[in-house]
Amino acid sequence: MKNILVKGSGDVTDSLQFFNFVVEKARDNYVVVICGGGTKISAALEKAGYVVEYDELGRRVTKTWEERMIMRDVLEHEEKRLQDKFVGKGVIVVPPILYAGSALCPINGDDLVKAYYLGFDEIYVFTKEERVEKKQAVFQEWPKVEIVGI
């Protein structure tokens, strides 16, 4: 049995290809899925009147507690949605949210993959086809990470 980590961009987790891949891996392995939600987070922030900003690494910048709450709500909704999809399939779903004491710390899903790197035998990052090259650059020094474009 292997430990397998799968990160799914919120833009691809509804695809049958993603679902079938995860379920197949979970047949004989321990599988954890990190749910994404970047596009949905940006839309929710804009709807709430926030200007979405990014740092030099392309990570969303949050300045207020309210922005972090919006991010948390979107990510927890994605987590619940995927948990419901994988009921009975032996798949654990986690959102990219960390807590330092009671401080809420949303983390970019790709950064969470890197943080979990040593605990997994196989790691897959599912993204939209047009983002594959960018993701390959993000993980170029992380040899276990395989990028899958949908």
Image (cartoon, helix red, strand yellow):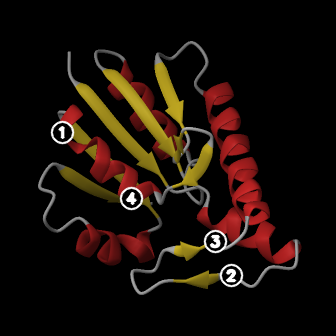
x and y percentages locating residue 60 in the rendered image: 56, 74
Q: In this rendering, which labeled residue sits more in front, label 3 or label 2?
A: 3
| C-alpha gap between disc 1 and disc 2 | 32 Å
Residue at mark 1: 118
The secondary structure type at the circle numbered 1 is helix
Counting residues from the start of the chain, the first of labels 1 and 2 encountered is 2
| C-alpha gap between disc 4 and disc 3 | 17 Å
Residue drawn where x is 22% and y is 52% of the image: 145
Counting residues from the start of the chain, the first of labels 4 and 2 encountered is 2
Q: Is residue 41 visible?
A: yes
Q: Looking at the picture, which amino acid does disc 1 mark?
A: Leu
The quarter in which the N terminus is drawn is: top left
Judging depth in this view, the residue of 35 and 111 nearest the camera is 111
| C-alpha gap between disc 1 and disc 3 | 28 Å
Q: In this rendering, which labeled residue sits more in front, label 1 or label 3?
A: 3
Q: Looking at the picture, which amino acid does disc 4 mark?
A: Asp
| C-alpha gap between disc 4 and disc 2 | 19 Å
Residue at mark 2: 52
Residue drawn where x is 62% and y is 35% of the image: 82
x and y percentages locating residue 53 in the rendered image: 62, 84
Residue at mark 3: 62
Residue at mark 4: 110
On screen, residue 135 versus residue 42, left or right, reads left
| C-alpha gap between disc 1 and disc 4 | 14 Å
